[in-house]
Image (spheres, rainbow, N blue to C red):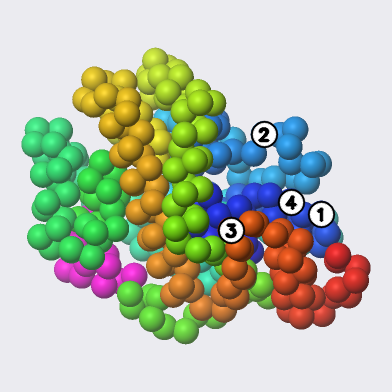
Amino acid sequence: MLVGPTAVGKTELSLRIAKAAGCEIISGDSMQVYRGMDIGTAKLPLEEREGIPHHLIDILDPEEPFSASIFQRLCEEKIREIVSRGKIPFIVGGTGLYVESVCYGFTFQGESGDEAFRARMQAFADEHGAEALHARLAQVDPGSAARIHPNDERRVIRALEVYETTGQTLSETQEQTRGARKESPYRLCLIGLTMDRAELYRRINARVDAMIEEGLVGEVKKLMEAGVPRSAVSMQGLGYKEIAAYLAGETDLPAAVELLKRDTRHFAKRQLSWFRHMQDLVWVEKDAEGKNSDLFNSICAIIAGKFLLDLEYIR
């Protein structure tokens, strides 16, 4: 598995590793599952995948829900399929809970949930706004409120629901889960890619500018014109909620772009925080010049040591 913050360079490196070690790639990204959402998710075009199979990309319409438990089930199915072909499953992505749930077989409780409570909270948000709903969460679970964006109403409601039904906050539950030593059903090789924070933020800002130039506004407009509601899980993703606000006349484009850059930098910080608490993870650092050959050699050594492969072969 290769994880790390957005814009750190996972995609390019993953192709080289997959080709060398005989892998098929499973996307560990919560947004790349959606069709028609390509620019904002930095989805690698089919023609640039160098013939390497990629899984869990373009499998859902933007109106459909997606969650960590659904990802876990689909990913486990893909792992079995890939292994049956004699290949190595290679998860690449930055959605911490999703990938860790597969590594250690997390059990997700109460996925059906309290529909009546959810409906009441949604009605409250519709009447008073997302900020007011988020403020309710901050009162009972400040830890989760700090991690969840106010516009992500689905996750805010889910965190409130956990507290309502169990009497325990979602952040407390996650800390208990993460604090315990976890056993994996798999033979894991977990690699985290990182780099200097200032350089990472520079890359994030440049990536957002490139997305705007490539047509992110048009992509979001097309989704909205197709009837995808702003409350959909897909439209809560970075790039989509900010540009949707601009298209709805709630802000101007320069402000939306700056907000997207800020939100993405904050997201990268949360990703790094999550992965730093992930057991068994081995970090490799990418320098500002991006010497991928050195990175590749370091990662080859990690893989060879973990799986007792011939290092000369996987190079």
**Which amino acid type corresponds to the residue marked 3 in the rendered image?**
Ala
Residues in magenta? Answer: 161-174
* Residue 237 % position (x, y): 40, 40
Marks 2 and 1, how far apart at CA: 17 Å
Circles 4 and 1, Cβ within 8 Å, touching? The answer is: yes
Marks 3 and 2, how far apart at CA: 25 Å
Circles 3 and 2, Cβ within 8 Å, touching? The answer is: no
Marks 3 and 1, how far apart at CA: 25 Å
Circles 3 and 1, Cβ within 8 Å, touching? The answer is: no
Residue at the image point whose x is 64% and y is 49% from the top? 11
Residue ranking furthest to the top:
225
176 to the left or right of 31: left
Which of the numbered marks, if any, corresponds to residue 19? Answer: 1
Residue ranking furthest to the bottom:
181
Which of the numbered marks, if any, corresponds to residue 288? Answer: 3
Mark 4 nearby-residue class (10 Å; few <14, some 14–19, many ≥20): some
- 2 or 1: tag closer to the N-terminus: 1
Q: Is residue 309 above or below residue 2?
A: below
Which of the numbered marks, if any, corresponds to residue 15? Answer: 4
Locate the N terminus and report the quarter of the image it occupies.
bottom right
Q: Where does label 2 land, which residue?
A: 45
Q: Is residue 150 above or below residue 97?
A: above
Mark 2 nearby-residue class (10 Å; few <14, some 14–19, many ≥20): few
- 3 or 2: tag closer to the N-terminus: 2
Q: Nearer the viewer, residue 251 or 248?
A: 251
**Which amino acid type corresponds to the residue marked 2 in the rendered image?**
Pro
23 to the left or right of 310: left
